[in-house]
Amino acid sequence: MDVAEAVGRALVAAGVDHVFGVVGSGNFHVTNAMVAAGARFVAARHEGGGATMADAYARTSGRPAALTVHQGCGLTNAMTGIAEAAKSRTPLVVLAPEAPSPLSNFHVDQAALARAVGAVPVRVTDPSYAVEQAVDAVRTAVHQRATVLLNLPLDVQASQVPHPPGEDPLAGVRPVWADLPERLAPSPEDVAALTAALLRAQRPVLVAGRGSRSVEARDALVELADRTGALLATSAVAKGLFRDHPWSLDVSGGFSSPLAAELIAGADLIVGWGCALNMWTMRQGALIGPDATVVQVDDTADALGTHRELSFGVHGDVAATARAVTEALGEPEVGGERTAYGYRSPALRERLATSLRWRDVPYVDRSTGRRIDPRTLSVGLDEILPAERVVGVDSGNFMGYPSMYLSVPDERGFCFTQAFQSIGLGLATTIGAALAQPDRLPVATLGDGGLLMSAAELDTVRRLGLPMVVVVYNDEAYGAEVHHFGPGGHPLETVTFPETDIAAVARGYGFTGITVRTAEDLSGVLAWLEGPRDTPLLIDAKVVADEPSWWLEEAFRGH
């Protein structure tokens, strides 16, 4: 058995069941070995798309994924997607063959590339340890929530793995979650401090982030909130975590509805759970009252206080800390829920039920007959599309509309690849999320710039037979730049474009393509939903673009 086969088989035995990417000469054998061992290979049309598909699959499935690329140029093509995954702490293994000779056209310092974007570089250097190093790469990805670049020198790949005759060099390899470390328990002192803060608080708000995206963490936080009278919110990446809870505020930050922002800003205690409480989640600090106590709970010590001055930090796992604090509270009150004072009043419960969602906030419809208001479009789609959906969102001026107007069934129904703020990732994001949630309707929401940047992956959607709905908020511009620089009188020719018939482009890839200019044009979506859905659907929505989205001004303050 050569190293390429051993590494491929070891990755699958360690728990990787999906591998995405583009196959060339250097990664041909290792990729085929993974497929032969039982992994599903998903061919992307560009390595950047493959990287983001793998990232989204891992986020939405809760399992590690792999990306496979050609040496050198295949890796550089994928670097934006790898940076997004690394910044998001996605458990991802990148298989990158490596040209060992500096004279090769494909030679680059691949380890330096990995470190530059926050990924962990590893190199297989000895056939005797190839299996162990491959398993360790998956273990690092899962246990440390890291993106790992596994460099596979071409000469080492072709070497034979030494082992006694008749012995399988992979004997004993098992999925890495079989030996997950125990969850980090908080110190008794930290538990006491957080318990005391919650008992003192009259208006506590718990904000759950990426580190809370699990059933165990969600249930522990809901129980703690109910015991302490706290309201529940999430960062954008954890949207849907508290879906249908009567005291949920949905997303905290730039996307917050007016009622959510009012209540978070009025809190006397804000606790971030696996949440950075960064400028996005706290609106540059505007959602933190001047006298509020601010606490952050995280199992990574370096994360505490990185983005914000804290009253104190708690070093511990989210679920373990929430359970410890709940236990420290003692016996629950009658009914198990604290509603005697603070935020949890009958009047507020009614307001949350009727006025929290953005679609419940009145607005003046700016549709013109030639262009549709993005709010009207989003509300209409939310009503038409099946509730069991997984929504992927690209970056741009439009992104708040699908993020906040399209409901999702839970946190696995929303995939938000925005840690690197790159446009062009949304289509691949939704492909990866769709494969992780095959029983849900995938909905990709993109701007025209992001769609045209990634249009090659329309072929991947069609080839995979995904019944995807792709919604393009088409303002024929890089809208964020238009609205940021336009008021200053700057020329905008560099960020505006002639009209493109994106529906026709999609039809060329085998989609059903429709153009939407009015709410009545959404009848085409209904017709597709009622039909066999044997082709994916692209909606080229010509949206009104005369003013920026509500969150954009807030976002640019952080630049």
Image (cartoon, rainbow, N blue to C red):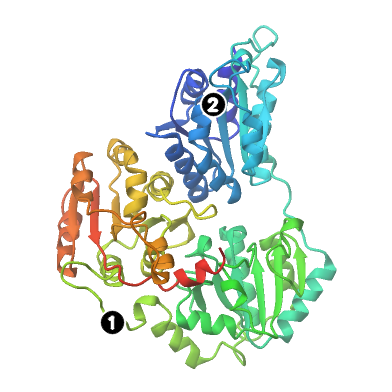
Above or below, comparing residue 56 to residue 204 in the picture? above
- Quadrant of residue 15 within the rendered picture: top right
- Quadrant of residue 301 within the rendered picture: bottom right
What is the x, y in percent for residue 292?
69, 82
Which residue type does callout 2 highlight? Gly
Decide which of 331, 12 is in the foreground and name it. Answer: 12
Left or right: residue 347 versus residue 110 is: left
Asked if one can make out residue 442 in the rendered structure from this viewpoint, the answer is: no
> Around disc 1, counting alpha carbons within 10 Å, would you say few (fewer than 14), some (14 to 19), or many (20 or more)?
few
What is the x, y in percent for residue 387?
33, 63
Name the quarter where the N terminus is drawn: top right
What is the x, y in percent for residue 7?
60, 23
What is the x, y in percent for residue 303?
71, 59
The residue sitting at 66% across, 62% down in the picture is 319
Q: Which numbered disc flags the more N-terminal residue, 1 or 2?
A: 2
Whether the residues at callouts 1 and 2 have beta carbons within 8 Å, the answer is no
Residue of label 2: 72
